[in-house]
Amino acid sequence: MAGLRLGPLLRQVDWETGTGATVWVEADRACEAEVRCADGAGGTARTWQIAGHHYALIPVTGLRPDTETAYRVLLDGEQVWPLPDSPFPDSTIRTPAPGTDAPVRVAFGSCRWAAPPSDASHDPVGPDALDTLAQALARAPEAPRPDVLVLLGDQVYADETSAETRRWLAGRRDLSEPPGEQVADYEEYTRLYYESWLDPEVRWLLSTVPSCMIFDDHDVIDDWNTSEAWQRRMRATPWWRERILSGLMSYWVHQHLGNLSPAELAADPLYAEVRAAEDGTEALREFAARADADPGYTRWSYRRDFGRTRLLMVDTRAARVLEEGRRAMLTDKEFAWVREQAMDGVGGSPGAPGFPGSPGAPGFPADPEEPGTSGSYDHLLLGTSLPWLLPHFVHDVEAWNASVCGGRRGGRWARIAEDLRQRGDLEHWAAFPESFDALTDTIAAVGGAPGAPATISVLSGDVHHAYVATPDWSRWPSRPPRSQVRQLTCSPVHNSIYASIRLGFRFGWSAAGRALGRAFRRHGRVPHPRLSWHKTGGPWFGNQLMTLTLRGRSAHLRLDQAQSDPAGGGARLVTALETDWTG
């Protein structure tokens, strides 16, 4: 009898028709996987194999719009989900009512170290925000819940394993040999996903709330693709090739496939090849090798539309161009795709590769129409694991570093700056100045188009604190965007917050930090930025999630922190911020 090894994960619900969904599972052997819904909807799929593991992405059809139905998972006709004696409510699929003014609730965060505490009564890094959300939803199943959970990176930590995982690794190989206590291959990656997604609360949450995911560095290794020098050093390391291939392969299986719509899956030649093969390991391995060698070989970024809300998830790790002198956060081709998707339906031309941003350039209307022209969507969410707008001091130091590494102050300073870049994690958007400008130009172009959305929100994580930053367009060289633009940063979901991080980021936002940043900019001969911004919320520290509720032309933002309940009984979500804005 086949057993359920991992899942189910409810990955997608069709917002265009409200009649379909996809569910991801891992079984312990080859079998027929089936989803049966209480209202008669359902679907089946045969498992496919990677490295001895058996997976299925099950298309569910026949759902009714604007309903909620419980579902079961069966393998070869035998029920394996819900689990016997489960303390959680039934997993359900909620479908939207297309064409209505129903709100869209988007919860997001990043950086979840899934290691269970050794003492069940005390978690040294504090309560897990996803666990706490799951408990709150389970206690009140009729309460509003997210329509989608956006996970912005570091879903697993390949380079920071738990004590339990280290003991398991020691049973496979000698940990005195590189990569030591980090994961080495595909099988060890699967262990990380078991540790993370078999957490009972998170397992139930992911079975009943659709999710969108993108990787960040720890899904592979800290500071993945920081620079050309970093990449050259890592590729000379004997264990690196197996690590990077396994990281990309496991991401494709566990996260990327579920991000794709049924139509995108049907058009994906690799997915077809893997499903048709007796064992798809070599095909997937070859794909991963090509993707690592050439950042333009594949596109991990993707688009999802939720009614009149558009989500663009942007790959800020694997698509980087690292060659000094032409560094970019994304290839020209991928930048062009992002801009095209953002401009689609708001009026104006998508523009050409390179993101021209001056008035009158392609894709940037020289004289936008007055407000009132309605585009095809009301809210744009740009999901990028790395923040666009950082604390001022951090931004200026990264811009200085990029300039000096590029040789602006000579070879000796370039070597010093490269060492600092790798030691100090100086590799956000600010460290790719032309890409920072390109993203800024894109946001301005979308916000200034005839059918501009009401709000543009850049959703980010990575930096282990939360804040809200608002651009100041007063010095912008052309007409400022009409859209309300925000940088919304939220992390971690579950990780440690060192005192140095708290002090560093508080200083980064301070007047003294801004002054010191200007000194760095002068030394690096960095031009004065065209855009300024200011912090309008935070910083907040702790395990936390943000939720955007979008309805009509209005947006409501809430930040919830997971805190231990002083009365006992686990943890609770405490609201630290609520704010509204309208475009």
Image: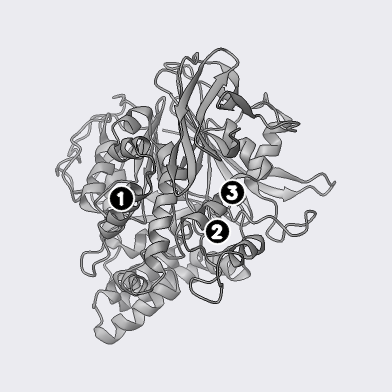
Q: Is residue 191 above or below residue 368?
A: below
Q: Is residue 568 above or below residue 317?
A: above
**Front residue of this view, candidates 263 and 550:** 263
Q: Secondary structure at mark 3?
A: helix
Q: Quadrant of the C terminus?
A: top left
Residue at 40% across, 26% down: 308
Earlier-in-chain disc, 2 versus 1: 1
| Disc ID at residue 464 | 2
Residue at 29% across, 54% down: 291
Residue at 47% across, 70% down: 513
Q: Is residue 240 above or below residue 281?
A: below
| Disc ID at residue 194 | 3
- Mark 1, other Cα within 10 Å: few <14 / some 14–19 / many ≥20: some
Observer able to see residue 426:
no
**Front residue of this view, candidates 317 and 204:** 204
Residue type at numbered disc 1 = Phe
Whether tag 3 and tag 1 are in contact, CB under 8 A, the answer is no
* Count of numbered marks: 3
Query: What residue did someone put label 1 on?
Result: 287
Instruction: Give the distance between the C-alpha atoms of the residues marked 2 and 1, in whole angstroms.
Output: 32 Å
Instruction: Give the distance between the C-alpha atoms of the residues marked 3 and 2, in whole angstroms.
Output: 24 Å
Q: Residue furthest right?
A: 567
